[in-house]
Image: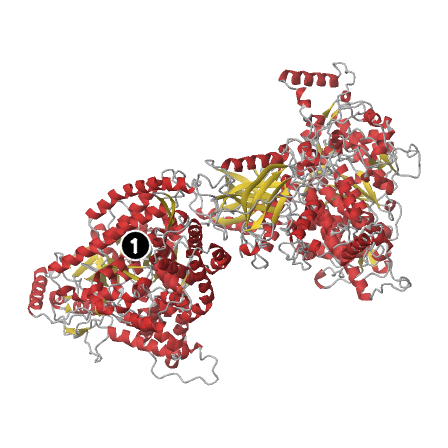
Amino acid sequence: MSRLADYFIVIGYDHDKDRNGSSEGRIIQRFPETDWESCPFTQSIELFCRPIGWTLSAQRQPPEFFVAVLTDIDADRHYLSVLTFSESVAISPTKSDDGDSEEDSAVTIHSLMYSPKCLVLVSRLDYFETFKNCLGIIYTAYVDKLDVQLEALVGNILGCVQVPPPGGPQVRFSIGAGDRQALQPPVSGTVPSSHSATALLFQQLGIQNVLTLFCAALTDHKILFHSQSYSRLTDACQAINILQYPLKYSYVYVPILPAPLYEVLNTPTPFIAGVHSSLADDTADLVDVIVVDLDGGSVHIPECVNLPTLPEPMVSRAKKALTMIDISSISTCTWSEMVMNADLLMADYAFPPPSPKKPPSLEQKDKEIRAIFIRFFAELLTGYRSCLTVIRIHPEPFITFHKANFLGHRGMVDAEFVVRVLEGMGFGTFVAERGNPYRACDIFDEVYANIHDQLTVESADPDKVMEHIKDLAKQLHTNESPNPQPYVQKVPKPTEGAYNRIHQTPFPILDSENVHKILREGIEKQNINKIPLRPHQVRIVPMGTPITALVDRQRIVDNNARRLEVLRNCINFVFDNKISDARIIFPAVLRALKSRVARLALTQELSYHIRSNRAVLEHQQFDLVVKLLNCCLQNDSSMDENGVAAAILPLATTFYRRLCTGIIQFAYTCVQEHAVWQNMQFWEAAFYLDVQKQIQQLYAPHFEENHVGDKRDSFQSSPTHKNSELNVSKNCNGQSVTQEKRSSYRAREMGALEIAAEQLRTWPTLSEEKKAEMISNEESTVYSQAIHYANRMVYMRVPLETQKTMKALSPDWESTSNSNIASSLADSESIDAESGYDEMEICDVGASVIKFVTRFVDKVCNDSRVTQEHIKSLHQMIPGVVAMHIETLEAVNRESKRLPPIQKPKILKPTLLPGEEVVIDGLRVYLLPDGREEGLGGNMGGPTLLPAEGAISLTNYRIIFKGTPCDPLACEQIVIRSFPISTLTKEKLVKLQYTPHIDQLPKEGLQLRACIFQLMKIAFDEEVSPDDVEAFRKLSTKYRSPTNVFMTFAFSGQAVPQPSAMLKPIEKNASLKNFAKKTIMRTARKAGIAKQKAPKRKYVLPTPPMSRRSMSPRSSAGSDSESDRPASEALDDLSIIDEGEFGRSWLSDPKVIEKLMERPGYQDYIRQGFGDPSDGTVRGKSTEQFRVSTINSNFSVSKSYPALLVVPANFPDDSIRKFARTHRQYRFPVVTWRHPRTKALLLRASGFHGRGLMGMLKSDPTTGTSTGEISATLHQERYFSCIVSATPNSTKSYKPSYSDSLTSLDSLMLSGVQDILPETPEVVRRSHPATGSMRNINNPKSSFLTLPRRTRTLRNAWPTFSRIGSIREKPRGNSNSATLDHLSPALHQNGGVNDRADLLHTSVQGLKRVALYVLGEKTQMKGIKVESFPKCDFIPVDFYEVRHVKASFKKLMRACVPSAPLTQETGFLKLVEESEWLLQVQNIMQLAGATVDLLDVQGSSVMICLEDGWDCTTQVVSVSQLLLDPYYRTIEGFKCLVEKEWLSFGHRFTHRSNQTVANQASGFAPMFLQFLDVVHQIHHQFPLSFEFNQFFLRFIAYHYVSNRFRTFMMDNEYERVEAGWLIDDRRSSKINHDQSDLDGGFVPRYQQSNQGLSIWDYIEKHHRKSTVFMNFLYSPTDQDSVLRPYSNLSNLRIWDFYLTEDLAHGPAYEIETTNKEIQISEEEKTDSSGQPLLRKMVNGCYDNVSIQLPNVFRQMLLELHKLETDLGHFQQKWKTVWDRLELPTGQRETIHRNFSFNTQIVKSHGRSIHKRSTLEILVKGKMLGEAAKMFSQPHRFEKYTYTTPAYCDYCGQVLWGLLKTGMHCTDCGYNCHEKCLSHVPKNCTKLKLVPDSSNSSANVSRSSDTSTLKSEELPVDTGPTYATYTPTTTNTEQSCLHKGYLYKRGALLKGWKQRWFVLDATKHQLRYYDSEEDTNCKGFIELFDVQSVQPIRNVQGAPKKSDENAFFELKTNRRIYNFLAADSKTAQTWIDRIHSFI
């Protein structure tokens, strides 16, 4: 019996602490006044009575009742029942002491106010309705003045009402006010009472939200409710708490939290709390709290909170049941608002059943909901009692839960929800309370025992679900209301409106003595009249369904029977010493061990052989057993959910082998490298299981009769748990005992829980001596087992090699990790190359083990209640055991190394190339699998080729692995993987994981990545010493990075190079004195102070008499920054060349020129008809417009250009020298190809130079700076004029080819411009209707942009153009079209302007048919004044810089050759997309396509001027020529193309390919590989147009970086001449000069005995001998002369060069080694008689299919060759045979192709798409300049008098003086003449203009220079003049999306500064200035780099008086910026504007 209430308290408003209407609560009276001993009085109760604070009110409030919950220090909950009412208070209007007036009060003070007063009952019981009645009676007696004493009422409540415990009878009582009340205790105290709380929660939130909260509460998250009702808060928290039954919520639980205690919400521990809605805003800053709005029915989950999903199928059943609750009896009117709308299932019924007359009550629904959740827990925890482990029975039971065993059997290892529930405090309490096998049971125990059977029935009959739920709900209802007869209570209530009476006296002060007197009398009476109580019935808790019964045994047996039989046979072979037989089936056993059942069966079989005294093993037996144990542990996780590690533990400490006399080695020394041994939870669980077995044996004699079967089967008991699946394993292993017999025995055996229950039952009847004996026995059992496990842990934790440090994984991390021992970060690309050796290791092994074992002992001994004396002795024992074991292992380790090595495969010698020498002979290694699927036998099929065991060799050319697969089934194959040492890009150490088929894998390995898309992941064998490994790494680095190219294999492969002469130039400046002297003298000679010395023959390359610097400045917009790169291979001191350092010119020796012209690149000039420099009549020919100039024959103009260049014939060489300086690297425009039909020219050059510091340094020293600039610019303009005049398109029109007549650029513009030009609403809005047709005022042929005449539609919209290539919409003559050259004035009415017409006029004005298109960089194009270059158009284009190519290539390599298997998140296609490689290929194809169209269709010349002219320029020019000229699509032509464009024009192969050590830091840049990829794409689309095949391209891609050939060495032709092998052509027999003749013009700088081999000679040699490079589909007669490939991404593909490899013989590009390996392989494949096998097996993952299965043409040629050999005939070359092949006689004339109309349409459409891309490039380029001006606002000009010199921003003329007043824009500061006002573009940006330095660059001429040009009689065309667009740093009004002042915080520890910010839409930048008037941009932020922008709060160091909501943060790829706006609205505007761009 217990008290109904412990305390009664009266709490009122504390007027003494009143502060303007607010104060604190004050306890007026409390009864009893002294604390109960069992229940101390709780402090701060007054805070919970008024959670929102004690304040006065102007109105009288009705009484309120709610219940708050307090938790004391013992975790016991106290319930505060609070009834609050109002009392009147008279307020005097006096001034307060502190001088505050009433106006400052937060509450309006009146003369009559009302203060709150609370009546509180404090109880430990939760009878809320009784408390409400009792307090209501007291209030009624007070307010209605009943004739009762309030003291009697209070005394009776506290002393006279006694409540029986749960299970007791109903109590009927009265507190003395004429009331009748009844109180019914629940039947079971462990089952909470809910009344209707859970149903109400579902009604408020809905099913999904409640399930979310349910999941959050169980997984220890923070939950906060808020509502306007305190009662709803209490009910909601109580409901969440009740739904967790049978678990108990053990964290902070405060349903009603007072405002002063809000800091509780910041606790890091989980909680369930509630606050009033009026205070909800104060909790808005809680970031990890789930907020629930009960009134609104919403649940807010923060982003940082990740809730696990509820497990299936339990949650699905629960959701379905919640929806189905009482389908037949739901009333729509009552339950329509509930989310649990049961009529959902009847919504589609045609005739739904009628609504029931009596709707179910809310309380009934509550019980049904609770029944669903109880069933949920019963199903979730099914089998949990089978995983309980009994540790102690006496004096108190101690039982633990084997979590891993439960998760493993239930298959929930990866179920995050279940794992977190089992790890929570609630489940720990659940095990502690319900683990006891002998106790009182409740509803959950019954449901748990029957749930499995119920679910089985329900699966057959779904209607049983609701039946079972209703039965359980009825039990819950009976538990709360066991009395079936209702008792009518009588509770007085106050009259209606009584609380609002005007004259109401305050609540009286109660008589304390009277109350205590009644209280004492009641207590004495209860002591006398005690109610007899029925004790709780204690019984054995039902076990429920065993966890093993949840598994389908028959299915497991069927799936594992065969593999278990193989496993058993293998083990028998091992122990019978039939090692050869065991090895045959060993791979199958290893695969079988992936099954859990097989692993358990293995441990049982090994246990059987231990009992047969077979623990001592031979060496080979020992190795196989260890391998089996390692495989078992590898396939299991560190959690050991299957009990495999626990079963292996005794085996590892039993099996051993004898090393020598007195020294044995146990198996545990070889199985230590697994994570499970570092998992503390594993050791605890294993310890508890063994203790349980000892406890069972301790009490087994008492139950002998129940253990007949157990004794008979004891030797087969599972080492893990009695409930493990031993029956299955035994049955599969063929034990003689049948399943039926064992089951009969098992039915009689008693488990540990049953034994514990029996012991607890008989415990009270035992004597004290017997009890003490049992306690002592259990203590000794636990203690002895602790000693045993301490030794086991020492065995498993101390490594064999104690001198080496041991990996010390954190136990906390280990306990939660499920990864295997081999899981590491080895394959992460971000790991440093040196990681994996010393970072994660500790020094003292013994100290680490002692610490680990001591922690274990403390944990398990304290939990098991071992005495402190025993624990102390264990602590003293552990260090001695560790030290002794370490000493023992030293001898074991020493002797184990003396064992004879295991027989290993023979090291295979690699096949070498001629001249290839082995540097490091074969080191035995394992080749491990990487992320590629080939050779793994997985999804791609085939044998398991990897891992392979063999040797790795380092030669002077390659790194070669050659070995055999470790898988015995594939060991007859030979695996070869190799790559040239020069292609090695990255080497790093990696940590290795366990790999099948390898016995003992080392911890570390080496990963080698090559740029030819090859990867080697190797692990060195234990026989390889660390010194050998280090020597391999050092030598590979040495040969990878030679000091110069002459040390590479191309030059040193056949002869040892002489000492390099490359250091000789440094000797001249060996000292600082000599260097200073030489520099001073050189400067003096240049200045004319010192006399010029006689020419010295230092470098015998002569130079013309001029002195200049050869170094050129870099542009910031260049493709690659060269300033931070190492020097090129060829002498960098030649960048500064003295004229005295050269001999005579080459021109004096025509033999040298003639020799150079024999080079393939120069022969191409002769083929195109550019002439021969050796012919002296070239210059005299007036008909030839071009000549081959020798101006650069001594490389004095440009060191990176070839010696011979094609230039206009009438342009002198002196002028070339003058204007070459206007281009970067002096790479001026030269002609490289001429169209045979249109005679249009293709030119290449580098980007233009800007006027900067380097531009000033490049000034001609012979003249002044300004004069030199003007002179160079004039010569540049003249040179361009010569190019224009040489283009036929400049003077006459041409007739396009017949194939392009329908889709020429003229007609294409009609369909393309509409889609390219952006729609501008402002333009459409301001446009006016056109009243008249557009007329062509000038010659119609002057423009190719024509538009069909259409009628303007409604709303002045511009008509839609026709589709691309559309035949219907084509204009039918000039009468129906009008040009956009000049618009008729009739379009402008009333001064209005047709802005769309202006837009087209200005944007496409530059797209007229001009003679020369210059494609260049945006930064270089913007400052060019086009009027100085008539008939030229400058088009800025987009292209990818070298740094982008580098980054893209790295990503592509990791996608194509991953170091680890790819996941679903990082799939192959996604990685390829992220690399952007195909986008770069597409960009090159589009630029080349535009060049092709302009040359072939438009007939205009094209000049490519990108970056330095040797990267992207070369790519575009080469691809363009390949598309235009069929000659380049032959093998000989492709050779000419590469020699001319890539080699002669100076692509930096040495630098880009990192061929020397000086270039390693720059990074590999595969520009040439990208070009070959483009050719591959074109070849794929046009396979009939190429003489060479795809292998030809792959061969070049492989060898251009292999350094086998000299062809792709050096950076330019000058360096190759220096090397001495460019002119030396040994195979040429046409011209044989004497060496002395060549010495007259050239002396090689490097005297090499081996000049290297050319790749073209090699290709030509093999092409003559075989068809390896031949494309048999080549049809030169049927192909199109001009190719137009598709460049959209859907038509591009990943080159198979990136993806394929040949493990059979290595890369097929080493033709000699490949053929030899194939020959060796075929010789070995013979039958039993020695004859070669006729059957050939080809595996796509191993063999090269194209070699093994050649195509039919190659096969027939091979057969023909074989027949000729067999018959003894003369063997003809294959080419001769192929050329003689003809079509059948008489068929050739009749065969012709019939092109259908659809075919023509398709081809026409393809050309249209191709040319649309061209048009898009042109229009986009012009949009950057001209057209951008029309998307803006007009200027606001005012007259302005300039007092300082200024220039007109339109015409560039001076604007200064009093008489020369000009016009000045007040918004942007634009200046112009009054006469220029009408021509000024409308591009006002409302910002100051910033003059661009590029306007005055060296290559830009002013209009004033025109007269000079005319005076020199340069050809000037009279074409249309172009409006000059002056670029500004700001953009148009539309591009300026937003601007304003913002505060920007600087770097760390810097303050806030105000800046003027401009958001530019065109440049995609956020720029800032010092002020609005500032013209100089101080910095900018690229919007492309912005990752996010968001508001922030609580910014540290914020300015004073700043709005905290006005801060926002902008995060880029590099850093984070903080900004402060004027207010929050402005900040949000900035955020929205920036968001629109990112």
Q: Residues within 10 Å of mark 1 (few under 14, many from 20)?
A: many
Q: In which quarter of the image is residue 178?
A: bottom left
Residue 1337 in view here: no
In this rendering, the count of numbered labels is 1
Residue 912 in picture, x, y percent from top left: 66, 41
Between 539 and 1567, the residue placed more toward the observer is 539
- Which residue is tagged 1? 687
Q: Residue at x 45, y 67 (%)?
A: 561
Describe residue 332's horizontal placement relative to residue 169 as left or right: right
Residue 56 in picture, x, y percent from top left: 26, 57
Residue 1444 in picture, x, y percent from top left: 63, 44
Describe residue 1278's horizontal placement relative to residue 916 as left or right: right
Q: In this view, does 1625 lie above or below 439?
A: above
Q: In which quarter of the image is residue 1419?
A: top right
State how the image is colored: secondary structure
Farthest-out residue, top = 1090
Between 349 and 1922, the residue placed more toward the observer is 349
Identify which amino acid the numbered label 1 is placed on.
Phe
Describe residue 1240's horizontal placement relative to residue 244 as left or right: right
Residue 1091 in view here: yes
Residue 555 in picture, x, y percent from top left: 44, 70
Q: Is residue 1858 above or below residue 1804?
A: above
Q: Quadrant of the N terminus?
A: bottom left
